[in-house]
Image (cartoon, rainbow, N blue to C red):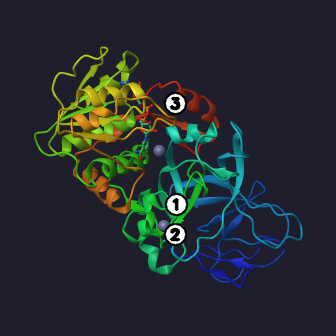
């Protein structure tokens, strides 16, 4: 549904049992607004989007009623006399610059502008990039709500023409905006735009109850993708960018995947879907992850020093981000083969780069995702050629974020997602 704001005073939106007796800021409600009565000191509203109410004074707590029942409280507090509406969602953010400085914060929600949508977050994945933001090793603009691996349900749209999105379960592309005019934007490579502003680092991200994004960022998820696993679509789109744009392997190629984290197991699945014979390797400490790989029907093994993985790879996909992983990849790949850098080291590393020359290797990579890589990711999901469901270790309430971040840092499990609607 499209929710118009009327005359800057009240808002209205849905249909529903108007009750003019509910004292909202001392003013009456007109139009097809929606107040269903008062209970326990709370005004209940039905169908009112959380941002869509302006009150003159006082403090009102609204529960947003959805088909499933009341499930969220939205604080619409105002200082007396402040006529601007204020709607807040709780988000896990980088609060100020410097290492650390993470915490829960109240984040203002605005009504979506034309071309934007407001998505109610179901789950958001925790990724190495979030740790880098925590450690001050990745660019961001504080204060900002983190989280860029988002799945949710479209709640409200800024334009009536986008109404058909309301209620759809989606995953989100991550660029809130790009400049649109640089050579990269103009040639279809927004991932290279220096002015791109991504959710979770420069724009408020998905570790919050709601997120605003451009409608063009939405991808509807196939029903069989698990509720929480939908958050892993974004890393999958990074992998399809690395492997399929341009394509780096062909049916029958031997593909070695180094590093059995989320990125490695997505890479292995995409390579298999493209017809590769895939072997995934990891460290002794990765046994639990290699077991997940095997359950997914992949061949997986622990690396023993510099031993051969068991075949001569035509293609190596470096998904560990470690210097040792890069060196191993360069050593193992066949002459004339292809080297794909998926992992990020985050610091200079020493590697035998001469292999690129002596073996006449083709080296490619991919940073983040593009609309094209999302199209490929969604197709692979729809065709059940990539399975995200086994990759989710835990869906944790947002209040547990410190424990979850520590687990990710320690390499426990696989993909942790945060469920912002649950406060723990
Ligand atoms: N290209 C992109 O757009 C993009 C997007 C997201 C993440 N990344 C990067 O991809 C990398 C992997 O991400 P992830 O979430 O799977 O990380 P992760 O840390 O969960 O997984 C990395 C795995 O590699 C293993 N490993 C480390 N050294 C190894 C070695 N020498 N040989 C074999 N295995 C080794 C680790 O034990 C771990 O299991 C990270 O560097 C991340 O920053 C890239
Ligand atoms: Zn990520
Ligand atoms: Zn640009």
Percent across and percent down for residue 423 are 63, 41
| Res 15 label | none
The mark that comes first in sequence, 3 or 1, is: 1
Residue drawn 30% across the image and 23% down it: 291
Labels 1 and 2 touching (C-beta < 8 A) = yes
Residue drawn 51% across the image and 46% down it: 124
| Res 408 label | 3
The residue beneath circle 1 is 194
Q: Is residue 211 left or right of residue 388?
A: right
The residue beneath circle 2 is 179
- Say which quarter of the image contains residue 39: bottom right
Q: Front-most of 112 and 270?
A: 270
Q: Is residue 121 left or right of residue 97?
A: left
Q: Front-most of 67 and 256?
A: 256
Task: Classify mark 3: residues with Cα within 10 Å, few (<14), some (14-19) or many (20+).
Answer: some
Q: Is mark 3 within 8 Å of ligand 1?
A: yes
Q: Front-most of 225 and 244?
A: 244
| Image depth: mark 3 or mark 2 in front | 2
Percent across and percent down for residue 146 are 60, 48
Whether residue 260 is visible? no
Residue drawn 31% across the image and 33% down it: 354
Labels 3 and 1 touching (C-beta < 8 A) = no
Task: Classify mark 2: residues with Cα within 10 Å, few (<14), some (14-19) or many (20+).
Answer: some
Task: Classify mark 1: residues with Cα within 10 Å, few (<14), some (14-19) or many (20+).
Answer: few
Q: Is mark 2 within 8 Å of ligand 3?
A: yes
Percent across and percent down for residue 178 are 51, 66
As helix, strand or loop, the secondary structure at mark 2 comes to loop
């Amino acid at each position: 549904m499209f929710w118009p704001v009327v005359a800057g005073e009240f808002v209205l939106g849905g249909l529903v049992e108007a009750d003019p007796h509910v004292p909202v800021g001392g003013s009456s409600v007109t139009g097809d607004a929606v107040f269903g009565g008062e209970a326990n000191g709370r005004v209940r509203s039905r169908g009112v989007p959380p941002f869509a109410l302006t009150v003159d004074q006082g403090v009102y707590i609204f529960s947003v009623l959805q088909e499933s029942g009341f499930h969220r409280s939205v604080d619409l507090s105002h200082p007396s006399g402040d006529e601007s509406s204020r709607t807040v969602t709780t988000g896990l953010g980088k609060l100020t610059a410097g290492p650390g400085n993470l915490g829960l914060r109240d984040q203002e929600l605005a009504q979506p502008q034309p071309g934007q949508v407001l998505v109610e977050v179901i789950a958001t994945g925790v990724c190495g990039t979030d740790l880098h933001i925590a450690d001050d090793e990745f660019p961001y603009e504080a204060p900002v709500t983190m989280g860029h691996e988002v799945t949710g349900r479209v709640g409200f749209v800024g334009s009536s023409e986008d109404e058909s999105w309301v209620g759809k379960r989606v995953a989100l592309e991550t660029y809130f905006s790009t400049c649109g005019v640089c050579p990269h934007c103009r040639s279809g490579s927004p991932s290279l735009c220096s002015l791109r502003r991504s959710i979770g680092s420069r724009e408020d991200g998905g570790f919050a109850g709601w997120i605003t994004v451009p409608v063009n960022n939405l991808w509807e998820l196939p029903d069989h993708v698990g509720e929480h696993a939908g958050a892993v679509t974004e890393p999958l789109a990074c992998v399809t960018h690395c492997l399929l744009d341009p394509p780096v392997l062909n049916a029958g190629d031997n593909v070695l995947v180094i590093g059995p984290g989320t990125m490695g197991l997505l890479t292995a699945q995409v390579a298999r879907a493209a017809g590769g014979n895939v072997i995934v390797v990891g460290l002794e400490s990765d046994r639990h992850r290699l077991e997940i790989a095997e359950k997914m029907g992949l061949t997986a093994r622990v690396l023993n020093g510099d031993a051969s993985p068991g075949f001569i790879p035509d293609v190596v996909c470096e998904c560990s981000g470690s210097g040792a992983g890069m060196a191993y990849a360069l050593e193992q790949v066949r002459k004339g083969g292809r080297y794909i850098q998926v992992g990020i080291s985050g610091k200079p590393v020493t590697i035998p780069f001469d292999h690129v020359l002596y073996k006449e290797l083709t080296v490619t990579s991919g940073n983040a995702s593009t609309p094209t890589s999302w199209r490929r990711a969604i197709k692979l999901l729809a065709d059940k050629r990539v399975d995200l469901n086994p990759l989710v270790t835990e869906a944790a309430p947002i209040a547990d974020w410190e424990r979850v971040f520590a687990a990710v840092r320690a390499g426990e499990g696989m993909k942790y997602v945060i469920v912002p609607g649950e406060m723990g």
